[in-house]
Image: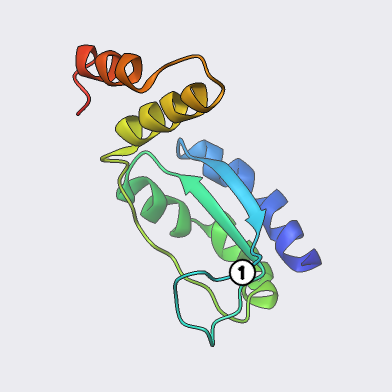
């Protein structure tokens, strides 16, 4: 953990330099769906403006100089490229659900709100 924290501090300026930033980091608790033989300590979500930005960062000498810290910290890892195709819709529906639960919207009002926003 100490090696990864050191790596995180060293990589952050490089990440910012290519237009990226760490979005979220959290401790893994329980795998609800997935291989039962995989145990994870943490998960991190990092934004890069493009795949090329990521590639540009990892090709630098500065990144090569700190890579040993990442290698020392991680027994295993996964790097998964994603695209937030449906994120706005999910976020809107989630926010609506929370408001409904709090009693601020009825089901019908929530449906009409989403319909007016063009969200099915």
The residue furthest right is 2
Where residue 28 appears, x then y in whole percent?
64, 64
**Label 1 packing within 10 angstroms: few (<14), some (14-19), many (20+):** few
Where residue 4 appears, x then y in whole percent?
71, 64
Q: Which residue is mark 1?
A: 30
Up-down relation of residue 17 to residue 78 (above or below): above
Q: Residue at x 44, y 16 (%)?
A: 105
Q: Is 43 positioned to the left or the right of 105 in the image?
A: right
Up-down relation of residue 119 to residue 55 (above or below): above
Q: Quadrant of residue 90?
A: top left
User: How many numbered marks have been drawn onto this rendered protein structure?
Assistant: 1
Q: Quadrant of the N terminus?
A: bottom right
The residue furthest bottom is 37
Where residue 87 appears, x then y in whole percent?
34, 37
Q: Quadrant of residue 102?
A: top right
Q: Quadrant of residue 74?
A: bottom right
Q: Is 61 positioned to the left or the right of 79 in the image?
A: right
Where residue 9 appears, x then y in whole percent?
71, 49
Applied colour scheme: rainbow
Q: Residue at x 44, y 29 (%)?
A: 97
Q: Nearer the viewer, residue 78 or 114?
A: 114
Q: Secondary structure at mark 1?
A: loop
Q: Residue at x 75, y 58 (%)?
A: 5
Q: Is 66 positioned to the left or the right of 2 in the image?
A: left
Q: Quadrant of the C terminus?
A: top left
Q: Residue at x 60, y 67 (%)?
A: 67
């Amino acid at each position: 953990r100490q090696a990864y924290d050191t790596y995180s501090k060293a990589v952050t300026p490089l990440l910012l330099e290519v237009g990226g930033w760490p979005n979220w980091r959290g401790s893994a608790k329980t795998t609800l769906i997935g291989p039962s033989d995989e145990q994870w300590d943490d998960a991190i979500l990092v934004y890069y403006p493009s795949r090329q930005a990521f590639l540009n960062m990892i090709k630098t000498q500065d990144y090569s100089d700190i890579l040993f810290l990442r290698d020392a910290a991680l027994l295993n890892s996964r790097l998964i490229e994603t695209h937030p195709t449906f994120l706005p819709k999910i976020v809107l529906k989630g926010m609506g659900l929370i408001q409904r639960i709090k009693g601020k919207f009825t089901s019908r009002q929530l449906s009409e709100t989403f319909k007016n926003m063009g969200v099915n």
